[in-house]
Amino acid sequence: MSVVTEKRLKDRSGSVCELCGSDENLAVYHVPPTSKALPEDSILACKTCIDQIENPETTDANHWRCLSDSMWNENLPVQIVSWRMLARLKQHDLLDMMYLDEDALAWAGATGEADDDEGKIVHKDSNGNVLLDGDSVVLIKDLDVKGATFTAKRGAAVHNIKLVWDDANLIEGRVENQNIYILTQYVKKTK
């Protein structure tokens, strides 16, 4: 993470969580799917917000009463995360009040938050654990890497994975200093 990005986000937000307004345990959250790590695709958020964004099963609806304010934030990444959380909480009355242009709506919907659970793409490892952007995994099998001159070895750690949003069976990760696509059936999530 860039120190410049963090400073710009703190300046932009007044050093408070751009979602709930907390001033404790703040961190930069890069709004997926993104890899640029710029203020234009990131928010400053507290640990509580980030934990609940990344772990849907821990979502506490009472914590997210703040969305009725953050949805009106002038910064697009804050609007995107607010839209996603409103969709997750099925707050359709508030969602109907938001306006996002076509590109912003595509970004907001990229994680599948608004999809019905039946049609939602969920990435799971070989043990059935849900995978999220930024997770770390370990390979459970030697994998021949197509188009490369190496084999990804069993037990190799892959940190900060990226989900392939349109395919529940694929993730992207860095092995031996190369970005590769990996089938989720060959990885195990680490804590």
Image: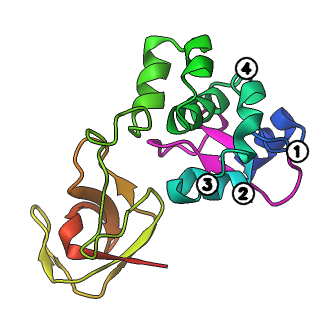
Q: Which residue bears the numbered disc 2? A: 48
Where is residue 73? Give x, y as percent. 74, 23
Dot in front, 3 or 4: 3
Marks 4,1: beta carbons within 8 A: no
At label 3, the amino acid type is: Gln
**Left or right position of 145 against 76:** left
Residue projecting furthest to the bottom: 155
Q: Which residue is mark 4?
A: 72
In-front residue for pair 4/108: 108
Q: Which residues are magenta?
A: 22-43
Mark whose residue sits in front, 1 or 2: 2
Separation (CA) of disc 1 from disc 2: 16 Å
The residue that appears at 68% across and 41% down in the rendered structure is 43
Earlier residue among tags 4 and 1? 1
Sequence-wise, the earlier of marks 3 and 4 is 3
Q: Secondary structure at mark 2?
A: helix
Q: How far apart, in angstroms, are the residues tagged by discs 2 and 4?
A: 21 Å
Q: Secondary structure at mark 3?
A: helix
User: Are the residues tagged 1 and 2 within 8 Å (C-beta)?
Assistant: no
**Residue 11, image x and y in percent?**
86, 37
Sequence-first disc among 2 and 4:
2
Q: Nearest the camera: 89 or 124?
A: 89
Image-based side of 191 in relation to 131, left or right:
right
The residue sitting at 46% across, 64% down in the picture is 160
Instruction: Name the residue type under label 2.
Output: Thr
